[in-house]
């Protein structure tokens, strides 16, 4: 269920029926190799949020997917066409304001669903959640060890920008939404590139070009499959469900204390 597609009357009825959670997808507009769209991170967050809605409903939690925020901190992609970012301060301010206003509108909880994994971006998203009242805004992002270790080997190695991991996710989304053009066919012939983003960042590298990612990708996109993408979405959706349910349980405990 998408918030933007509801009428004001339908949303009011949803609020009247009980607590409603807003899932706010956060992404970026940045290069993802020669084969994936600039909106890849946003698409992944949107699809993961959509797949989390029925899982939350199965636990008695009503949720809607809010309109996405498709801009983030994209400093690492500098030097490539399409790296359209904002500062960390602007991102934190925007998400803090959006979260606060969604809560004021009547949502019981807001979950920021983030799949753009640049460290400064992740920190800005988490700063926004921390700026809101405790327990009201959570973050679902696979960058933490808790969730990252549940994902694919390529993701765990850190070779996962527009590689097998993200290409599989975009393939699965394209199949689900009939957006066949999201992945350019050339991915099938792309050579694997063994560059660990995690290791490079720890070593002080500051851009994809410094890391040796001359085409703005790392990993093995040619090995991507729709089936793997669906498996990964199941894990990302479960991450969202757990973050939301734990936050709601924590809030309930605080209210009764």
Image: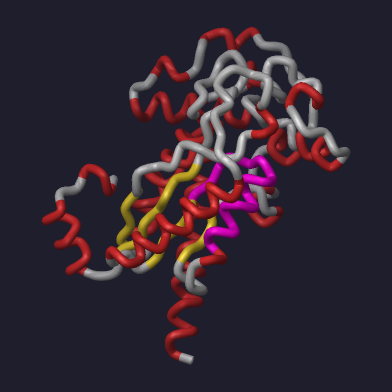
Residue placed most toward the observer, 228 or 162? 162
Residue at the limit of the structure toward the bottom, as seen here: 257
Residue 200 visible in rendering: yes
* Residue 241, horizontal then vertical, whole percent: 46, 58
Residue 60 visible in rendering: no
* Residue 5, horizontal then vertical, whole percent: 22, 43
* Residue 99, horizontal then vertical, whole percent: 42, 59
Please name the residue shown 54% across and 66% down the image.
131
Please name the residue shown 64% across and 43% down the image.
151
Please name the residue shown 34% across and 22% down the image.
178
Q: How many tags in the picture?
A: 0
Q: Magenta span covers which residues?
A: 113-129
Residue at the limit of the structure toward the left, as seen here: 9
Q: Is residue 164 above or below residue 72?
A: above
Residue placed most toward the observer, 79 or 62? 79
Residue placed most toward the observer, 230 or 211? 211
Give the quadrant of residue 198: top right
In magenta segment, residue 116: yes
Relative side of 229 to 8, left or right: right
Relative side of 127 to 204, left or right: left
Colour logic: secondary structure
Q: Is residue 212 above or below residue 245?
A: above
Dominant SS type (magenta) = helix
Relative side of 19 to 28, left or right: left
In magenta segment, residue 225: no
Please name the residue shown 44% across and 45% down the image.
25
């Amino acid at each position: 269920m998408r918030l933007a597609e509801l009428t004001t009357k339908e949303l009011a009825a949803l609020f009247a029926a009980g607590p409603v959670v807003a899932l706010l997808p956060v992404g970026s507009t940045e290069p993802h190799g020669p084969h994936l769209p600039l909106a890849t991170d946003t698409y992944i967050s949107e699809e993961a949020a959509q797949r989390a809605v029925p899982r939350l409903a199965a636990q008695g939690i009503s949720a809607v997917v809010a309109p996405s925020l498709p801009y983030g901190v994209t400093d690492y992609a500098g030097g490539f066409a399409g790296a359209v970012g904002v500062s960390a301060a602007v991102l934190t301010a925007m998400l803090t304001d959006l979260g606060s206003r969604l809560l004021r509108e009547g949502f019981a909880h807001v979950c920021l669903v983030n799949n753009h994994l640049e460290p400064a971006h992740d920190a800005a998203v988490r700063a926004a959640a921390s700026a809101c009242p405790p327990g009201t805004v959570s973050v679902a992002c696979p960058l933490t060890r808790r969730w990252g270790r549940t994902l694919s080997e390529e993701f765990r190695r850190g070779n996962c920008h527009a590689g097998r991991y993200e290409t599989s996710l975009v393939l699965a989304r394209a199949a689900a939404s009939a957006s066949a053009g999201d992945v350019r066919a050339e991915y099938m012939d792309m050579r694997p590139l063994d560059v660990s983003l995690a290791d490079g960042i720890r070593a002080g590298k500051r851009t994809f070009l410094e890391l040796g990612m001359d085409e703005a990708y790392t990993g093995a996109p040619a090995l991507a499959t729709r089936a793997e993408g669906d498996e990964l979405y199941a894990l990302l959706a479960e991450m969202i469900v757990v973050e939301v349910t734990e936050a709601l349980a924590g809030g309930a405990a605080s209210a009764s204390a």
